[in-house]
Amino acid sequence: MSEEFRFETQRDYINYSKKMHGYSKAVSKLLDLVTGYIQWAEDQARLGKRVSYTAGSWDAPLFYGCNTIPIAFTELGRLGSRQAITLAENQFLTPKESCSMVNSMLGEWYMRKDGPIKKVLLTTGICEAIVMAGELIKKEGYKLHFIEDIFLPKWLSEDEQEERIRFFTRELRDAAKFLLDGKEPDETKISEEIKRLNRIIDKVHHIIDLRRDKPLYIKSLPTMYLLCGLGHLYGRPEVFEDVVTELEEELLHDNPEFDNNKNVIPVVWVGARGQEFGVYHAVDICGGAIVGWIAVNNYTRKYPEDVPPLESITRYLFGNTQSRNLPIIHRNQAIEREVQKVNAKGVILYGYVGCALQGVQTELQRAYLKERGITSLGIEGTFQVGQPSGQLLTRVSAFMEMLA
């Protein structure tokens, strides 16, 4: 790692990243947004503002259009407590082999059961385990609302697809009423939030394109956080948009010391955005750069503005080739296109320990990539706060050395 820093928590990696990006005010501001996100949202809830837990992947326009601050439960776990998983196992008697993300969320929610935030909005399509976790925390005083998810394979007739689109749009209206304590949503406000997020998506897309020529200007960890921000805007959409704009302007300036990318090993990251920041650090110190991303926050796709806003959110979600609501072949093809686009030497497929669905998906993806001569590494990380295992880091380092 580094002799100057001891990496014991996720915050240690963020602090290290801030130091390594001392030349970039925008990256520093982004990481400050990250570390202050949960506390700021909780403070707003204590002041009487609407705040709700959610997945924080595609639902930002819905939340802000309903004057509600989203807390992405993934961010809650990333910078959470070391005791969360153990607490969940003891309090809810979850098996140790359960998904570490789900156990982490249960522990974090249990520790906050007497806090100011009681609402949790989930979609049933996230995974069966997180839905069961939601049911478990009901008795702790949380108010839950489930959006019934749908599967939208391309082989459905046009009429069948449109009927499912209409069904999910109705589900979004019910979700909006849940956030608004029974009131009807202001669709004009939701439409304004869609336009704002589309502006930000354009800027982030441009940043990712610019970064391919300067892959070391923004290293892997802050790039991950930049993409995650598309799902929830860190509770402060105006501030996040300003940071993104400033970062775009920085990359447009001449930075000759970052222009040489010939010796950088380009990699595509697929799947969950890792909890174990040491994996990103290992890629960087081995001379690599994650220049392509296939995850739920798709920076290449915008929300349509020519349809009603709730329908727009639906069509964004179900037209997203990186969504779980489409057959895996669409995601595999998206990976292949991204590899070709960024001229990547390899692909890292990341999932969480205990997630059976992700394990099967990873094997299918590895087989698909192998048939096409694309080198990949499938790894399983954990949501436990702290350093990744030495074995995991060794595998990542060996993979990068092989690509070199």
Image: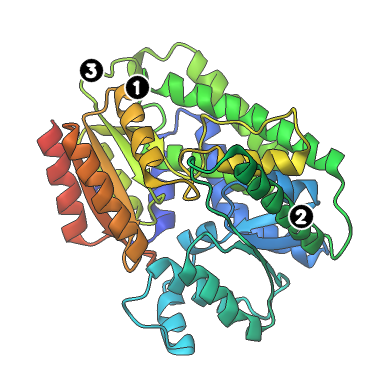
The spot of residue 356 in percent (x, y) is 33, 65
**Mark 1–mark 2 CB contact (< 8 Å):** no
Question: Which sits earlier in the primary sequence, circle 1 or circle 2?
Answer: 2
Disc 1 is placed on an element classified as helix
Whether tag 3 and tag 1 are in contact, CB under 8 A, the answer is: no
| 309 relative to 170, above or below | above
Mark 3–mark 1 Cα distance, whole angstroms, equals 16 Å
- Taking the image as shown, residue 262 lies to the left or right of residue 333, namely left
Question: Which amino acid lies under the numbered mark 3 shown in the image of this protein?
Answer: Lys
Rendered-image quadrant of the C terminus: top left
Name the amino acid type tagged 2. Thr
| Front tag of 1 and 2 | 1
Q: CA distance from mark 2 to mark 3?
A: 45 Å
311 or 87, which is in the foreground? 311
Taking the image as shown, residue 277 lies to the left or right of residue 397, namely right
Q: Is residue 176 visible?
A: yes
Q: Residue at x 24, y 52 (%)?
A: 363
Residue 13, x across and y down, in percent: 38, 50
Q: Which residue is mark 1?
A: 341
Q: Amino acid at mark 1?
A: Lys
Relative to 282, 331 lies left or right: right
- Residue denoted by label 3: 262
376 or 204: nearer the viewer: 376
- Residue 208: x and y, percent? 45, 26
- Residue at 39 percent across and 64 percent down: it is 383
SS at mark 2? strand
Q: Residues within 10 Å of mark 1 (few under 14, many from 20)?
A: few
Above or below: residue 225 compared with residue 388: above
Q: Could you say which disc has been placed on residue 68 in the image? A: 2
